Amino acid sequence: MLSPPVTVAPLVRAPAVRIVDGIADVVDAVAVVAAETHRFLRRQWFVAAIDSYGGTARTVMVERDGRPVVALPLVGLGPAMLGLRQVPGCYWPFRSGPVAQDAQPADFTALLDGIRREARGVRIGPVYDGDPLLEGMQAAATAAGWRVLPRFIADSYLLDMVASQAEGPWPRNSTLRKNRFNEKHLATHGTPDWSFLSGRDWTPDAFDSLAVVENASWIAERTDGSDAKFTAGGHGDFWRKAAEDPVLADMLWAALLRIDGQPAAFSFDLNAGTLKYAIANSYDIRFAKHSPGRLLYYRNLVRALEDGMTRVDWGAGDSGYKRAIGADRGPAIRDWLFLPPGLPALVGRLLAGRWAGSGQAAAPDAAAHAGV
């Protein structure tokens, strides 16, 4: 009589964590299997941040069955004696690290083990509530006795263009009429030219065109210019370096208005699948009464619909015009400190109020979405 076949359970290997100097090449391998909204978190994204803002990076990597599933670049935060680290990157649209869509709880436990070897605490963010890296780390940290401290930064605003279209013609006919009126009067200043930039269009001259607009905008008139995205005194170096990666260059997008050949307004985005991150809009204040920024971003949104995009993430700030377009409040944007058990967690308990107070005041109903 034959014995029944023996079923052998597949060998399940625990995830392995490694820490390497610099921004590891494996970052790209994780980014391509991350959520579509996070695939811009590529190696060159972090390299551009280090080159532009400084710091010495190390990358905490988690591998499962020989395949990378999490890659978290880190740089120093504050005085070296504190032993704190943070994710490098640009504020727009957020600071996070790539995570494979099939990452498991054990992978984040391994990630925290690696972070603990590397630092006494780590800052993640500013990042959106619901971010895959954030959620995985929160669950693992709670189970392992870490202290997790949030501070509110801002609310985001999201425009669902498909939902808006379902409610009736969008943009509305009244909006289109007003835009045509403004375009007619804008043309009295010269011949308008509307164009779009992406991929190989990102030449030094293209970025210079955006900087020209910012130097003629309210940013230059009312501020010190340090928040400008494309000028030498702002964040121009970051975006130029990020665009050296052809994959990122294809994601970067701008709508540009020229008047008689001179840059007059732009709308700059990062396209991630069907989601458009609206990074910056600016215009030459000489044309302000004809609403060139409004004219441009409506053209930009119509083009986005034609290209199959469905949602626009407007980020934080200046909710007035975003609500007028049809955007609604989205996930909150927060900064997070992860402090391991022991003295760091104890200190975190004592300083939690000060950390939270260093952020912004949340809107009355924002606390319900904190997840803490």
Image: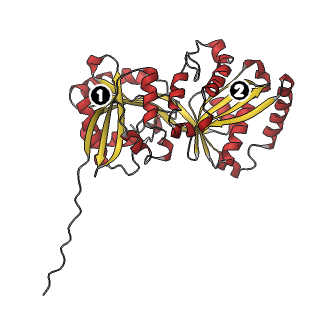
Residue under numbered circle 1:
121
Q: What residue is at 56 percent from the left and 46 percent from the top?
A: 273
Measuring from the top left, give residue 256's x and y in whole percent. 70, 31
* Tag 2–tag 1 contact (CB < 8 Å): no
Measuring from the top left, give residue 358's x and y in whole percent. 43, 20
Query: In the image, 182: left or right of 368?
Result: right
Measuring from the top left, give residue 21's x and y in whole percent. 30, 30
Nearest the viewer among 83 and 206 is 206
Query: In the image, 76: left or right of 250?
Result: left
Q: Is mark 1 on a helix, strand or loop?
A: strand
Q: Distance between the residues labelled 2 and 1?
A: 42 Å
**Rendering quarter of residue 57:** top left
Q: Is mark 2 on a helix, strand or loop?
A: strand
| Kind of residue at badge 1 | Gly
Nearest the viewer among 78 and 336 is 78
Q: What residue is at 42 percent from the left and 35 percent from the top?
A: 43
For the residue carrying disc 2, how many other residues have a C-alpha within 10 Å: few (<14), some (14-19), or many (20+)?
Answer: many
State the residue lying farthest toward the left: 1
State the residue lying farthest toward the bottom: 1
Q: Earlier in the sequence, mark 2 or mark 1?
A: 1
Q: What residue is at 50 percent from the left and 43 percent from the top?
A: 37
Residue under numbered circle 2:
265
Q: With respect to residue 299, does 258 lie above or below?
A: above
Nearest the viewer among 173 and 73 is 73
Q: In which quarter of the image is the C terminus?
A: top left
